[in-house]
Amino acid sequence: MSSKQSKPYSAFSTLYNNVMQDVPYQRWASYIFHAFDEAGIDIDDTILEMAAGTGLLTEKIAPRYPRWIASDISREMVLHNRAAAKIQADMANLPFADKFFSAAVTAHDSVNYLASLEKFSDHLSEVARILKPGGMYIFDVTTIRNVKQNFHNKEIREKHGNAELIWNNEYNPETRIIESELLFVTPDDVKRELHVQMVYTRKEIETLLRKHGFRIIRKDADYMRGSPAAFARLLVFVTEKKG
């Protein structure tokens, strides 16, 4: 049996839809629709989804916005995304013109994969660059509570057909880095992926947003308006690029 190291979300792309089948993407989409409507985002506006993955959120939202563009840094995830417009792109180095988009979205703790304050700052600089003045940016981040309760020192095992996913996680409270080793085991092969994320504090996030010219419109938990953050898995930020 062979074994090899893969880039994050390369081997995972083949199982991702099965693993994420319980994620409430429709609720997330409804929340985003509401925020867009309040901000006056029109169906003809050009909108960028970053870290779109295989398109599980994309397919809930893109039909309403014909100029929706889905992007992801993983070539394999992009290939599995059925969006009409999709592109491989690094969300800290976006290949788009200045002031091209009216809105942008990054969901499912993808921002945490920018595993340093410098990378996060680069990302927000890029989003500010490609958004029009007054453009909206919606993103979420994982909470420390979620990491400690559901991932730290936990092994997750799932069977999907003839493949098994073994997912081991370790969180370092000093660096706030969580490392996840994913093993994809089939009768003929074992592939490994190492995923690295950083847990950000609200103060760090708000400081960087101000630095890059964003105004926070609202903060919510788990894509539910008014939901308390104390027990949240995800904190959601709805922001606006200042004119």
Image (cartoon, helix red, strand yellow):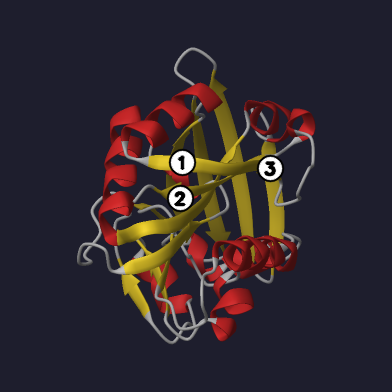
The residue under label 3 is which amino acid type? Asp
Q: Which residue extends farthest front?
A: 243
Q: Amino acid at mark 2?
A: Glu
Give how far across and how far down residue 33 sits, in percent. Answer: 64, 68
**Badge nearest the viewer, 2 or 3:** 2
Q: From what the image shows, is residue 185 above or below residue 15?
A: above
- Answer above or below: position of 92 versus 120: below
From the top left corner, tell me how far across and down residue 240 is, in percent. Answer: 46, 50
Within 10 Å of the Cα at label 2, are there few (<14), some (14-19), or many (20+) other Cα atoms?
many
Q: What residue is drawn where x is 32% and y is 32%? A: 211
Q: Is residue 138 left or right of residue 99?
A: right
> CB atoms at circles 2 and 1 under 8 Å apart?
yes
- In the rendering, which numbered label is found on residue 3? none
Quadrant housing residue 60: bottom right
Q: Which residue, given by chain and number where applicable, does mark 1 sit on?
A: 215
Give the residue number, with chain letter if any, for mark 2.
Answer: 240
Label 3 neighbour load within 10 Å: few <14, some 14-19, many 20+: some
Q: Mark 3 = which residue?
A: 220
Check disc 3 and report its element: helix, strand or loop.
Answer: strand
Q: In the rendering, at what x and y percent does residue 209 appear? A: 41, 36
Q: Secondary structure at mark 1?
A: strand
Q: Residue at x 59, y 75 (%)?
A: 61
Q: Earlier in the sequence, mark 3 or mark 1?
A: 1
Tag nearer the camera, 3 or 1: 1
Instruction: Determine whether label 3 and label 1 are within 8 Å by CB.
Output: no
Q: Amino acid at mark 1?
A: Arg
